[in-house]
Amino acid sequence: MVGAAALYFLGTYEPPPVDPEWALEGSAAIPPGAVTVRYTGTATLLFSDGETAIMTDGWFSRPGPLRIALGSIGPDLEAIDRGLSRNGVDRLAAVFPMHSHYDHAMDAPEVARRTGALLLGSESTANIGRGWGLPEAQIRIVVDREPIRIGAFVLTPIESRHFQFADPRVRERALGDPQISEPLVPPVGVFEYRLGKAYALHVSHPKGTWLVQGSAGHVEGGLAGFEADVVFLGVGGLGSQTDAYREAYWRETVGRTGPSRVIPIHWDSLTGPIEGPFTGPVRAAALLSGGSDRTLAFLKEKEAASPGVRFSTLPRYDEVVLF
Ligand SMILES: [Zn+2]
């Protein structure tokens, strides 16, 4: 029996850890040939140049906190349907989960099945695809730093690192023994979606370049030599790290790639609704972590110290012209 107080804390959310002043609106007009982005939440981004569309993660299911704590999870077909239609997309050339945890990779095989996309990722992500019955011809295991041309996009996956969970037990369960070595058939427990490999994704297009950093971790020097006009910066979990960790993360992502725009991602609740305004983390999680989320304060410091860098956050689903 779950007490009323516990239900209350599982059903309420902190405010999002981003500045409302950074919010972009959907673009009123999309010039032909423009590169656009649409954001669902967490690290699910849809990029299109009008000819070709690619997606990171493709995650829409958002199982609630009780399901995660007590039961098994699997793709929510109705949520995927709604998510794809709110993104206005029925054909995708590729879907690339940033790593194989459930909040990135769980829905990607179904997204690939519905849109004809190639599922790109590590062996672990491939095994999520196989467990869902996705044909082998629609699965491609990527090689670290080997560029993949898709339409006018060149995608370069770069092996990176996941953020470190503050709680050592969660850290061990979520990051220890990272491989999914057999086809994974849902529904399964949340930790069965093991990490696989955590990637940064560099994308280059004739109109511009960008980096998607899915999780707030880095490899020292891993992004040396990569430039990006825009960095989609994963900040989930960043607020509970040390100052030194945050500084190193910033230096090794934004510092290395020299963007003129930073767009924080993965700051919204994993369990919030798929429609309506974004919410911050579940209040219960914030309480467990001691309410010590420093994400917004850190980003504001960096904004003040980086006059050449514009900070933006994306609206939900609305199409925004990137280049
Ligand atoms: Zn993760």
Image: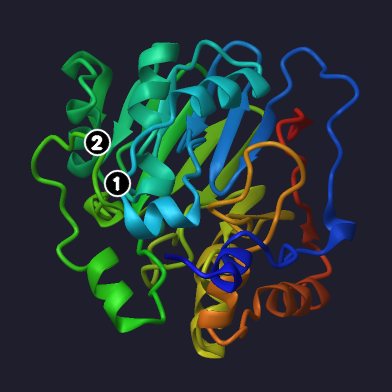
Q: Position of residue 187 (x, y in %)?
A: 26, 38
Indicate left or right for 193 with 152 as reference.
left
Q: Is residue 125 above or below residue 215?
A: above
Tell me which residue sits at (31%, 47%) in the image.
Answer: 100
Amino acid beneath label 1: Ser
Can you identify the residue that label 2 sits on? Answer: 186
**Mark 2: secondary structure:** loop
**10 Å neighbourhood of mark 1: few (<14), some, or many (≥20)?**
some
Label 2 beta carbon within 8 A of ligand 1? no
Foreground residue, 14 or 265? 14
* Residue indicated by mark 1: 72
User: What is the spatial separation of the Cα atoms under label 1 and label 2, in whole angstroms?
Assistant: 8 Å
Residue sitting at 31 percent across and 51 percent down? 71
Q: Residue at x 32, y 31 (%)?
A: 120
- Asked which quadrant contains residue 51, the reply is top right
Q: How many marks?
A: 2
Give the image location of residue 138, x and y in percent.
Answer: 26, 17
Q: Measuring from the top left, give residue 285's x and y in whole percent.
A: 53, 72
Q: Are marks 1 and 2 in contact (CB under 8 Å)?
A: yes
x, y (%) of residue 46?
A: 59, 30
Q: Is residue 49 above or below residue 211?
A: above
In which quadrant of this rendering is ligand 1 seen? bottom left
